Amino acid sequence: MKRTRLASARWLATALAGVLAPALAAGPEAGGAACIPAVSYLPLAADVVGRDGNGTASLGTYERISPDGRFILRSYSGAMLGRVTLMELPAQGTGPVKALRTPFGNEAFPVQGTWRYLVDVNGDHYRFADVLRQQDQSRPLFRGGMTGFYAAASELSASSADGALGTVYIRSLSWPQNADSDQQGVGPLQLTTLEIRDDGRQARIVSSSGPRFICGLRAAIDGNVYALPMISVDGREFSAIPQSPREGRPSMRVYGLDGSPSAQQYPCDLRADLGLSPSKAVFGFPRGAQAPWLTYSDLGHVYVYDRDLRQTFRLEHARHRVLASAFPGLTRDGRVIYGATWHDCADTRACPERAGYVVADPYQSAAYRAYWQGRGQPAPNACITVEEVERERALFARAHGLER
């Protein structure tokens, strides 16, 4: 994977050198060459998270997935856990899901790419590692960026000329604000870029671009009212649905953003059009020279969209009456993780409803394999391996000073 020389890349590269070299040297003998399960189900314990109105273990309203798939930032967690929790998934795909309290208000979000920071709705940025160790007693480092319901942010890549050791650029995108409470999340989009100086102990804002409206040059085509925006993990793209396009019907689309931290204009060039209007489309990580996948849920099912192939693949279920509860997320190695309810057997009386998290390998989905069989070609990827998952977990743990 090609990456520019910037602060966030160097930060991850340091962890990569110290952690991945031994893992790569171990090879298949370490037992990591095997495929992960096509689909795994991790139920929540009701005595830990509480129960919803149906007596089922309580799910959050929406979840954000860490790059290694180990942690889930969960909003609207319920009375037993508070407003927002960090859920920790087991290392081997089986075992209990842990819950950690946080100081956040509903709709808090991570700074994507590294998860170096977690952000409260008022713009307070907390170090992720501090929240893990101190939970709801942790304190913010600085306040800035876009605020309110609902914003999203990513670490922005900068050129080696712009970036310096200890310098982090954060680009945050607004959830459109509207005076009509029934129209929240629909309107013009704004973003801001922060320059942060972080020495590993303290962090402060060096400069801020201030809120800027974007996509004005596309008004003649897409109008200026968007819904369900989501920024990419590198801050260089975003997805959204134009509500009153001058051309065509509303559909989920991907637009480009200037990659420079000092950018003044954002033409929002069209990169992809899914041709439908699902829930929020969430970006995966770059896949070498290929565009990142998108993942979304629609009518209880979860899908991935391959932008290079212009193909959508539905991820099948391995349980009964599975219903995805919110938008899913993609890990750096390609797994799709989402909250859901399900039954372990067809007899709903013998097998009551359960709630928890689903981990799926898109490469092992029937739709993905059928597509390549139809082309008479072997699929480029057979599966995600145990080794790949362990590698990402080790990298993320090293970067944040965590135990594996």
Image: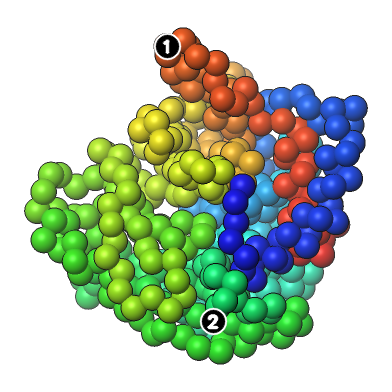
Q: Tell me, what colour scheme is on the image?
A: rainbow
Along the viewing direction, whichever of 392 and 324 lies nearer the viewer:
392
Label 1 CA crowd tier, 10 Å (few <14, some 14–19, many 20+): few
Question: Residue 269: which quarter of the image?
Answer: bottom left
Q: Is residue 346 visible?
A: no
- Most extreme residue toward the front is 161
Q: Residue at x 47, y 17 (%)?
A: 372
Give SS at disc 2.
Answer: strand
Task: Return the residue at label 2.
Answer: 195
**In-image side of 397 versus 140 (left or right):** right
How far from the left and from the top, in percent, is residue 263? 38, 75
Amino acid of disc 1: Gly
How far from the left and from the top, in percent, is residue 178? 24, 72
Q: Residue at x 49, y 22 (%)?
A: 368
How far from the left and from the top, in percent, is residue 19? 84, 52
* Relative to 103, residue 330 above or below: above
Q: Residue at x 64, y 84 (%)?
A: 197
Question: Residue 402: which quarter of the image?
Answer: bottom right
Amino acid of disc 2: Glu
Along the viewing direction, whichever of 91 and 200 lies nearer the viewer:
200
How far from the left and from the top, in percent, is residue 378? 55, 16
* Relative to 16, residue 219 above or below: below
Task: Return the residue at label 1.
Answer: 374
Along the viewing direction, whichever of 155 and 355 lies nearer the viewer:
155
Q: Is residue 239 visible?
A: yes
